[in-house]
Image (spheres, helix red, strand yellow):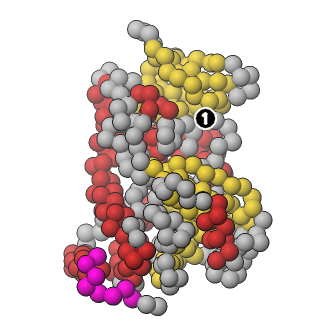
Amino acid sequence: MYDVVVIGGGPSGATAAEDLVRSGHNVALLDRAGRIKPCGGAIPPRLIADFDLPEDQLVAKITTARMISPTGRHVDIPIENGFVGMVDREEFDEFLRARAATAGATRVTGTFLRIERTDDVTVVVYRDKESGDEVRLETRLIIGADGARSNVARAEVPGGDTIPYVIAYHEIIEAPGPTGAYDPARCDVIYDGAISPDFYGWVFPHGKSASVGMGSMVKGVDLKQATAALRVSSGLSECPTIRREGAPIPLKPLDRWDNGRDVVLAGDAAGVVAPSSGEGIYYAMVGGRVAATAASACLASGRARDLKLARQLFMREHKTVFRVLASMQNAYYRSDERRERFVSLCHDIDVQRLTFEAYMNKKLVRARPMAHLKIGLKNLAHLTRLVAATRV
């Protein structure tokens, strides 16, 4: 009998498992082997500090971000007093799983099938990777951290089958040194309807490799063709491809994360990917941590309502940021004319500084009220076409 079975071994599930075993609980971490999520791999300094990430997990430190408009003009934004850390998800996720196991979690490899219940016990049923047999894990609680379009969420949590998402695709390639438009110390974000009609494309350096990809909600978009176009424009078309990956990325947190009984969601399963930016690793790990906190509270009190703490704790800190980012996406991603204005707005030094201060610290910066007022007025001017988009 486990206290908690965590379904899904990505950053969210691995974090939840480690936190729970360090709190003295008996935990099983169930994960499918060989699954790598398509991800640019960007993480903020706050993640490194909050989750005690060792330096050797960073494959690169990025000091400049380039925003590229539909007409090809660009804005280079220096990242002052910090950096964007880059990780490779293949190595990073396995590091987190191994760390949870070292702390005391029982690692189980297989495919989740279903949850069964009797009056006395809850059972997680999975198919063992090696034998192919169905195996049963008895548990008191379950954390569903099995990603976007989560099977746990769809089966257990109201609204878990309706979460909106984009389909993301990327290619990990062998990256050269500086060549063409590619700079191994710079992240490029491409806002161009020809690449993605409703999201963006990216070229993110990973040291000896790079992630080149894009995402879209629009059916019929050829993700592989768009990624090939990104590689050509960046001078990376001839680089050898290491692997290709695609998966859904949720765009909105679910209204409810628990079933009121014995299941709580975490990470992509709960929809905690930031709108506009698509950033997910930090929020997934926070989601795992608050799910572990809620599970611990429920185990201690015996009150199923304590599972609601997961969403409450997350939203208390991050709801405003998500709301602002969702407003930005709704305002600027709807057309190339709006994307052009968005990149133009990024020329503003106050926008640059406040954006990356918020990114690195995961808080809206409140120390400069006049800067916020200026940004709000400029934003309004661009959206109402009172000013022309700056040409560079």
Q: From the viewer's side, name the closer residue of 370 and 345.
A: 345
Looking at this view, name the residue that lies furthest to the bottom. 392
Residue 293 visible in the snapshot: no
Q: Residue furthest top?
A: 119
Counting from the top left corner in percent of width and height, residue 302 is at 32, 21
Q: Nearer the viewer, residue 193 or 281?
A: 193
Where residue 384 sits, quadrant-wise, is: bottom left
Q: Nearer the viewer, residue 262 or 346?
A: 346
Residue located beneath label 1 in the image = 31
Please tell me which residue is depicted at 57% across the width and 49% down the height of the picture.
247
> How would you classify the magenta stretch by its main secondary structure?
loop
Displayed quadrant of residue 103: top right
Residue 112: image quadrant is top right
Provide the residue span drawn in magenta. 383-390
Measuring 64% from the left and 18% from the top, which residue is drawn there? 134
Q: Residue at x 35, y 28 (%)?
A: 259
Q: Is 127 in front, or is 389?
A: 389
Question: Is 260 included in the stretch rendered in magenta?
Answer: no
Horizontal side of 302 relative to 131 (left or right) equals: left
Q: In the image, what residue type sits under mark 1?
A: Asp
Left or right relative to 132: residue 264? left
Q: Residues within 10 Å of mark 1 (few under 14, many from 20)?
A: many
Whether residue 192 is visible to the viewer of this picture, yes or no, is: yes
Q: Is residue 160 left or right of residue 102?
A: left
Element under disc 1: strand
Q: Is residue 389 magenta?
A: yes
